[in-house]
Image (cartoon, grey):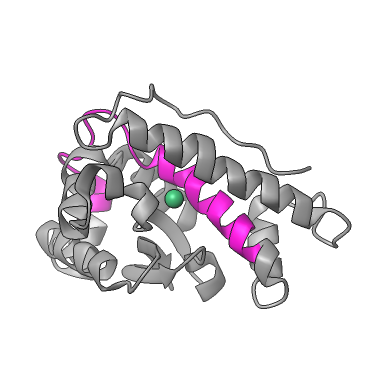
């Protein structure tokens, strides 16, 4: 098995005005495609050929940096497209909301800390909600890293590489993160990943 670029689960203009058609065209068709193509070239002849994306991410971490960067970004972007939907944001599903309040204080506090994680990630990287030791935690990672290589299961991630927001928000990363949480997140999908992570 090699890496395959998934189709976007909505039209390129479906997330406007919060994420433009131009951003999605570049982000999906150029950036994600490049991670897939480069990843496939780097996979050839390694022990990771035929493994799942998750297995490649975990196995290559700290061993094969170039492959890890591309496999990590492939994993992150597969989910990033699914973590958004047209008319996203809004109320959280009950079970997920209850757990967030239990572990992080409140939904508002979670949003505040998530934005802070994204803003505080110096340079390129990701802000996360992840399940670690049975609890939901806020995390941030540089470049293509994700919670999988830090003993946690990601349930929501926001790409804070400039390619994700510069066309629409220029340097206003906090505004992008706020728009992501309030208007783009597919909380039903987050809850589904939460359920899978706590099974
Ligand atoms: Fe990206």
- Count of numbered marks: 0
Helix, strand or loop: magenta stretch: helix
* Residue name at image x 13 percent, y 62 percent: 106
31 above or below 100? above
**Residue 82: in sight, yes or no?**
yes
Judge whether residue 133 is colored magenta: no
Q: Is residue 104 rendered to the left or right of residue 79?
A: left
Q: Is residue 181 rendered to the left or right of residue 198?
A: left
Tell which of 165 and 64 is nearer to you. Answer: 165
**Residue 93: in sight, yes or no?**
no
* Residue name at image x 66 percent, y 71 percent: 65
Judge whether residue 81 is colored magenta: yes
Give percent across and percent down for residue 12.
38, 25
* Residue name at image x 21 percent, y 37 percent: 18
Give percent across and percent down for residue 52.
70, 50
Q: Quadrant of residue 188?
A: top left
Q: Is residue 38 rendered to the left or right of residue 33?
A: right
Q: Quadrant of residue 4?
A: top right
Extent of the magenta region: 68-97
Q: Residue furthest bottom?
A: 62
Tell which of 29 and 95 is nearer to you. Answer: 29
Q: Residue furthest right?
A: 45
| Quadrant including the N terminus | top right
Give percent across and percent down for residue 100.
23, 60
Q: Is residue 13 rendered to the left or right of residue 51?
A: left
Give percent across and percent down for residue 151.
52, 73
């Amino acid at each position: 098995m090699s890496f395959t670029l998934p189709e976007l689960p909505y039209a390129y203009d479906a997330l406007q005005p919060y994420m433009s058609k131009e951003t999605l065209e570049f982000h999906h068709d150029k950036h994600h495609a490049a991670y897939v193509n480069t990843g496939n070239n780097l996979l050839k002849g390694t022990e990771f050929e035929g493994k799942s994306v998750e297995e490649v991410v975990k196995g290559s971490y700290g061993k094969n940096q170039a492959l890890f960067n591309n496999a990590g970004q492939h994993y992150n972007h597969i989910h990033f497209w699914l973590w958004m939907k047209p008319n996203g944001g809004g109320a959280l599903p009950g079970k997920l909301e209850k757990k967030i309040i239990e572990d992080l204080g409140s939904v508002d506090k979670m949003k505040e800390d998530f934005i802070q994680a994204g803003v505080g990630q110096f340079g390129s990287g990701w802000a996360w909600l992840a399940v670690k030791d049975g609890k939901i935690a806020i995390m941030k990672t540089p470049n293509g890293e994700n919670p999988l290589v830090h003993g946690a299961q990601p349930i929501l991630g926001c790409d804070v590489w400039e390619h994700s927001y510069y066309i629409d928000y220029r340097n206003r990363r906090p505004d992008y993160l706020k728009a992501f949480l309030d208007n783009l997140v597919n909380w039903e999908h987050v809850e589904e990943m939460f359920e899978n992570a706590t099974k």
